[in-house]
Every structure is written in C-alpha cells, then in structure tokens.
Image (cartoon, rainbow, N blue to C red):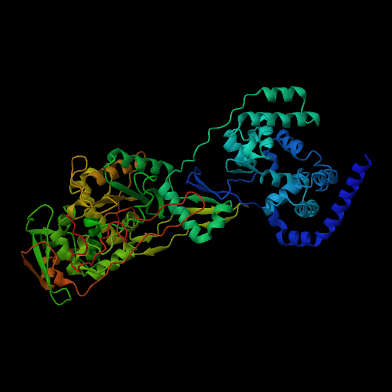
Amino acid sequence: MKKFVFLTVLGLFLTVFLANSFAGEANQFVKVENNALLKQAQRSYILANDGAVLTRLYLENREDIPLQNVPPVVQKAFIAIEDERYYQHKGVDFYGIARAVVTDIKHRQIVEGGSTITQQYVKNSIGSKDRTLSRKLREAVMATRLEQKYSKKQILEAYLNTIYFGQGAYGIEAASEVFFGKKAYNLTLAEGALLAGVTKSPQNFSPYINLKHAINRRDTVLDRMLSLKFITKQQADQAKATPLRVAVLKTEPVAAPYFVEYVKQALIKEYGVNKVFKGGLRVYTTLSPKAQRLAERAIANRLYLRKDPQAALVSINPKNGYIVAMVGGRNFKQIKYNLATQGKRQPGSSFKPFVLTTALKQGYGPNNTFDSSSPQTIRISRSRYDAPWTVHNCEGSGHGMMTLREATVHSVNAVYANLTVAVGPANVVETARQMGITTHLDPYPSLGIGGLTIGVSPLEMASAYGTLANGGIHIEPTSIIKIVDTQGTIIKRANPLKTRAISAEIANRAIDIMQGVIQRGTATRAAIGRPAAGKTGTNEEYRDAWFVGFTPNLVTSVWMGYPQAQVPMYDVHGSRGFGGIIPASIWHSYMGQFLAGTPVLDFTPARWSGKQAKRGSSASKRRSLRHVTTTQQPNPALQPGTIQPTQQTPQTVVTPTSPPTTAAPPGTAATAPGTAGTTNPPISGQAESTGH
C-alpha cells in the first residue's frame, strides 16, 4: 500500500513538473492554432440544380454536425466508455493520469491510457500517433488550455466530429451513415453504444470484421452506462437484446460521372485539392437530374451492344449558358476520357452553319444560287492555295444551280465549298470563334465542309449553336451556379461571360434556313413537334457522326464514333453512320422527352431584304473559281510547307479519391481522338464531310 501511495505521488509530481516544462510549447501551439484547432477537414458536396447529391469529395469522409444532432443517450455512451469524469475535470483527469503513470512505471512501458476526451481530441487534431510519456504530457497541457477557451459542449461536439470509426468514416455523422445508413440524430441506444465501443480499436471491434467482438464491446459500453446510472437496467437489457443490423458496405455510385469529373477538375484548378477535398464546400451545379437521366437513356436505347460506337451529348440552356446534361461516353467505368469535353472530332457538315452565318453577315440570302455539281474541282486563284481542290457531294452528281437554303437543307458540299471560298475561310474562323468555338482553327477552305486541323468537342458545338438560339449573344458555358462554404457564405456565383457575337437579325436568318434541315432535310428523324433548327454532320467514311440542334430554350449536341481510332461506321444497327440517323434519333428522344409538357416556344421570324437576291453564283465567279473534274484526293502540292497539327493530349489530374483516367483511350494517337497526327493539307484539312 505504501509503495502504491509513493508511486502515485511520484506520478503526480512528474505530471506537474513535466507539464510546466511543456507549458511554453503548448502556449505557442494554442497561439498558432487558435480557432483552427476546432476545425477539421470536411467532405465537400457536388449537388445538382435541385439540391440532389451527385457525389461527395473528401480525403476523410467527414461531415461536422452540431452536438444537438447527437442524441443525449449516445453522447453518454461515449462519455461512459471514454471519459466518465468528463464533466468534472478541466481537461486533464489527474486521477486517471496518475493511475496510468503508475501502471506504466510498473510495466516499464505504455500499457494504459488515461487520456480524457479533451486530450483525445487534441491528439486527433494534431495527428500524433506517438505513445510516449512526453506526448501524453503535451496533450495534457494542450487539453487544459483548450478547456480554458471552449465549453465542454463545444469540445465534445468537436471530439465526436473527429474520431475515426473505421470503414473510412470520420466523425459520428459519417459513421452513422456507413454503419447504419442513417443520420446521427436517428441513432438508437444500441447503435450508439456500438459506435462508442468501436473507436477504441476499429480493426478489432468493427462489426464488419468481427461481429462477435463488436457485440461484446457494445455490451461492455452498456454495462458501463448502467453502472454510471446513465441508463436503467431495462434499457440496457433491451439494447443488448436488439439484433445488430448494420448497413451493407457499398461503393457510392456517382451520378452523371463525366459531368462530376468535369466540375471536380474545374474546382481543383481554381481552389486547389485541399480546399476541394477538405473544405466542406457545397457546390451547386447546373445539372438537371431529369435531363441527365433522359440523355443517358436516349444513348443507351440506341447504342447498347458492346461493339457499338461511343456517343457523347451536351445540353445547354442558351439563355444563361447552364449545362443541364452531359454524357461523355457510354460507360464511365470502361472509359473515363470525357468525349463531350476532351474529344476533338471532325464535325463534318455540322460546321456549315458557321459558313452560313458568315455569308449572311456579308449580305448573302437564302435564294442566292451556286453550282451544286459533283465532283467539282475549285481552283483558288490569287492565293497561296493556287491549285485544284476537288469536292464531292454525298448524294452524287448534284442538281445544277441550287439556292443557299436548299444547299443547307440537303447539306450539299459543292455549294458550301464555293461559299467558303467566296466569304473567305479566315472570316469563317472568326465567326466560329465569336460564336463559341475555342479549339484552334486554321483558315483552310476545307473547314467550310468540316475538314478541320484538330476537330471540335460536343461542348464547343453546343455552345456555339446556342449563340444562334440566344439571338446572337454568346454565353460562356458554365457548370456551377454557386459555391457555399461551411459558414453558409457564398464564395462564388455563376457569372458567365456574355458577348454579342452576331446581330440578332443574322441569328434569326440562320435559324430560318436551318429549321428546314429538320422539317424536310437531312435530319427529319430529329423532329419533335415544336420549332427546332439544327444541322447534321458526317465525316468521311462515316468516322464521325453528329447532330447539333436547338429550340429557343435548349441546345443539344450529339456525337457518335469510336474514340480509339478513326474507325468507319458502315453498319451500326443496320444503317451507315450518318449524323441524320442515330445521332438525330438520340437528339429526338432526349429533347422530345425533356421538353414534353413545357410551353412550345417559337423562334423570332427572320426579316429578309431584297438585296440578298442580287448575289449568288456571280459572286463566286468574281472570286475566280473554276470548275473541272479531277480526283477526290487532296493535292500534296497544295501544302505550303509542313504544318504540324496542335497536339492536345488531355492532362491527367490525380485526385485523392478515385483518380480519373483522362488520358486518351489506348490506340489513340498523341492528339485527342479524331486527330490523325499527320501533316494537314490546307485545302482538305484532315477529312471531308460526306454531306450529311
């Protein structure tokens, strides 16, 4: 007995002596940490436009909650098993420490705890795993300082939000969700006792690892609560008799995975990994769950075989630039490369509206006529491309002189090749840029029929067509409405850049012509029973198929093709890979269902003046265009030197949660899908449009 008293006194003496020794260090710690000591990493949320959770981002799966959201009986369970004198001590339980010191001295090693809840919180906050005596004393001093600054309830709240329960769950809210599939405020006594027991050793007492040990530990907690008169014997017996039902562990599915990854990378770029994964942000996005569901379904219903090509879809509200749906591929698990934003593919005839808009700006009208004969070779005089360029129509020989309206409706290459040269390729580039195309464009004559140096993405095309739908005003596409921090402060609001790209009248005239594409042209499959306009696009040998179309309040771009390589689509469910078939059908399905039940809006009627009828084929002749018949292959002599295409290898950003694989799929060249990685002829670009 005397020996025990001596060791106890010695332990207390050492406690006080060493505590004073570390006081200066603790003062510095508290001064530096200040209020930050009570702030832990919290998971962030990416939310849809209706508040639905799309995904959670975290280094530690944690969500802080107020103490009032934890049932009092659950609070008592933790106090009973971890620190029964919590409300009596001032951060350090000297009786407990003395007992621990005596035991440790007896065994000449650290064998007993003695740390209070406050000390455990300090340890969790600074991340120390050191079990030395000096560490315990540092924690003791820091805990004392902490209790001088914060109330018992504040510290208990912080503790419950900090402790690790296993299974990746930090804090009682995350643990409640993982173990029982419920919020902490719904926890029962039996569930709370189990969670309180797990924290001592998640590896040993987790019900997912050893159910028997977990139940025994739960009962130990209940017995301790009973001995402290926190609960009655009847409550303890009922809790012990309650069958243990834990939630099935599962990988959390991510809704709209391509869109979520797109938003996540934008957040990391602006705020950095730490703030995104630790900052407890609530990111309210523009995505409509209904639109996303319908978009994914529209693609899945048409392309469902393993051998089928991939597809991408982007849908934007042209009035505010909000992205309401994004599908970057058919299966995110198989291909994480976002074909909606990263894929640069040849647009084929879907690029013709930029030529059309340029022509309208220069005074051309729907009744101007051009030679539609095919094959047709155009010699471009007085330019560095003074060599023949042969153009073919998809449908064959052509129909003699054809109006601009009919050439657009039926996607006639020969007419648009002539028109591109007439209005000037550089002017077409400028129009496309103003309307929303951000990828580098070279002013080659072939761009008018979709032969680009690099290609474009479905996001760009939807954005650019949206300029027409919005009366000539381009609004930068945006995916985030607002971001709110843990204090409820809005740290960012959507403020997309708005620019007047073309006049409202030019936009109305382009729409007037493009409505015919759906009404009676190459995209009749896209008709949805309300005013709509758009354009099909099909690359040479059916390697890329597009349909981009819009109503006054929604624009959607659909692409179909194989991302691994330039693979011809000669047979996709019994049809060739025309933009007017499957892409138009996908567009029809998605747009028709999403807009069903909404008011039918009409476009502003176009006003045409008489002067547009005065220009036509004669304008083309004034540009010195000659027509002869030659081969379809581009003439290598037309290349003024070697022009290397811009290499756009997607950047891979590794994040703390499942790292996305944003690199191009295997088999794709160093450039993004759709680029051949070879020298690009200035006339034909990389590919020709088939005309549809």
Residue 671, image quadrant:
bottom left
Q: Which residue occupies the foreground of this view, 136 or 348?
A: 136
Residue at 43% x, 53% y is 262
95 sits to left or right of 539: right
Q: Which residue occupies the foreground of this view, 457 or 82?
A: 82
The image shows a total of numbered marks equal to 0
Expressed as whole percent of the image width and height from the top left, the position of residue 103 reads: 81, 43
Residue at 85% x, 43% y is 95
Expressed as whole percent of the image width and height from the top left, the position of residue 44 reads: 55, 49
44 sits to left or right of 673: right
Question: In this orientation, does residue 418 appear?
Answer: yes
Question: In this orientation, does residue 189 appear?
Answer: no
643 sits to left or right of 375: right
Residue 407, image quadrant:
bottom left
In the rendered view, tell whether residue 500 sits above or below residue 406. below
In the rendered view, tell whether residue 83 sits above or below residue 36. above
> Farthest right residue?
2
Expressed as whole percent of the image width and height from the top left, the position of residue 91 reads: 80, 48
Specify the quadrant that holds the N terminus. Answer: top right
Expressed as whole percent of the image width and height from the top left, the position of residue 253 reads: 46, 41
